[in-house]
Amino acid sequence: MDIPLCDLRAQYDSIASEIDPLIREVIASTRYIGGPEVSAFEAEFARYSGANHCVGVSSGTSALHLAFIGAGLQPGDEVITVSHTFIATAEPIVTLGARVRFVDIDERTYNMDVSQIEAAITPKTKLLLPVHLYGQPADMDPILEIAAAKGLQVIEDSAQAHGACYKGERVCGGIAPMGTFSFYPGKNLGAYGDAGAITCADGTVAKRMRSLSNHGRADKYLHDEEGFNFRLDALQAAILRVKLRHLPDWTAARRRVAALYDERLAGNEKVTTPYVAPWAEPVFHLYVVRVPDRDRVLAGLREKGIDAGIHYPVPLHLQPAYHYLGYEEGAFPVTERVAKEIVSLPIFPEMTESQVDRVVGTLESLL
């Protein structure tokens, strides 16, 4: 595509002089698993997020898996989350023998509709799992208030929201007791492979999750409990340390691109641009618009060399994998309507004003 959805090559070119020597250094050190690079990244990302602790792990999915264990999730428990998200949000819940209960999303923010949470709570509900989708923070205060009143745990899924703020405070820092991140390559802070992290307020919980990520080790050949191979490797940690230093500038650049889109599309009544709530400081992992006749528009953009996408076309409650939950079409009308109208337009820190103008011009010609 002439204009990619996310230009990872442009990002690499901008930091190659920092990255290439570092990769050689880590390889030459032969410290490939754990070690000082992982410990340093954990400390630096905890400071960046405003969290007490950070545990580096192998992916955003494994981060959720361990966070659920840290929150005490047991087989038969229920977790309330949204259907409008990637399947990795729900997979670890089921893997641990618990059950997913979905709620609909807010029409404007595309995040959890907090007005639907209480009706979804049952005696088996253990945990609330808001997702900060597209880099837009969910409305956390009412979620935490409901959790406190009902004796529930809260974990934030911040796989797409590195550095996003809710009422001036970074998500997964000091808002909920635990939060999870993905560092998949296309994320705002992305590794050169899979990686993830958990931020945590409680040191005892963080220590257990770190042990579980490394086969439950207390020492090299001493295991307090059975664990997992969910370790963050040293090469990815070193790469993330470099990228973390650039993240504030990249976030500012994403916000500039989003502002250009907002300005160019403001007069077009056929396009619904992203809504930013007054309490939110988003990081625009994705710039998602709603348009009529979405499939034709998407095909037209791609035909013109613009790599647009859909995040996500089939809600989880309608996925074959979750047919057993018994949800039928129409169960979550806002989620289903949004899924048929959304298009993710290209956005990345290196995107130029002329590229934005071309995307907007092509989109408006198709409409």
Image (cartoon, rainbow, N blue to C red):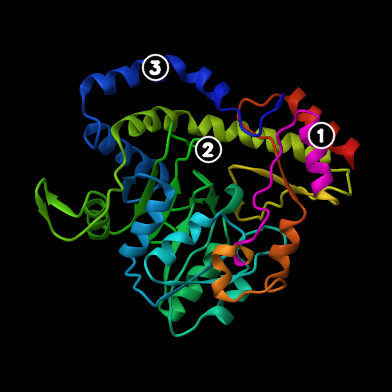
Q: Are marks 3 and 2 in contact (CB under 8 Å)?
A: no
Front disc: 3 or 2: 3
- Kindly identify which numbered label has been placed on residue 32: none
Q: Can residue 136 be seen in this view?
A: no
- Kindly identify which numbered label has been placed on residue 20: 3
Point out the stretch of residues depicted in magenta. 295-317
Q: Is residue 297 magenta?
A: yes
Q: Mark 2 points at which residue?
A: 188
Instruction: Mark 2 or mark 1: name the one nearer the start of the chain.
Output: 2
Q: Name the residue under label 1.
A: 360
Q: Residue at x 90, y 36 (%)?
A: 365
Disc 2, SS: loop
Q: Residue at x 49, y 33 (%)?
A: 247
Near-viewer residue (250 or 98): 98
Q: In this view, does 136 lie to the left or right of 291?
A: left
Near-viewer residue (147 or 302): 302
Q: How far apart are marks 3 and 2 (CA)?
A: 20 Å
Instruction: Mark 1 or mark 3: name the one nearer the start of the chain.
Output: 3
Q: Percent x, y for residue 13?
A: 52, 17
Q: Do the residues labelled 2 and 1 touch (CB within 8 Å)?
A: no
- Residue type at mark 2: give it: Asn
Q: Residue at x 55, y 70 (%)?
A: 142
Answer few, some or many: residues within 10 Å of disc 2's Cα (few below 14, many 20 plus, some between 14 and 19). many
Q: Does the magenta stretch include residue 244?
A: no
- Residue type at mark 1: give it: Val
Answer few, some or many: residues within 10 Å of disc 1's Cα (few below 14, many 20 plus, some between 14 and 19). some
Residue 22 position by quadrant: top left
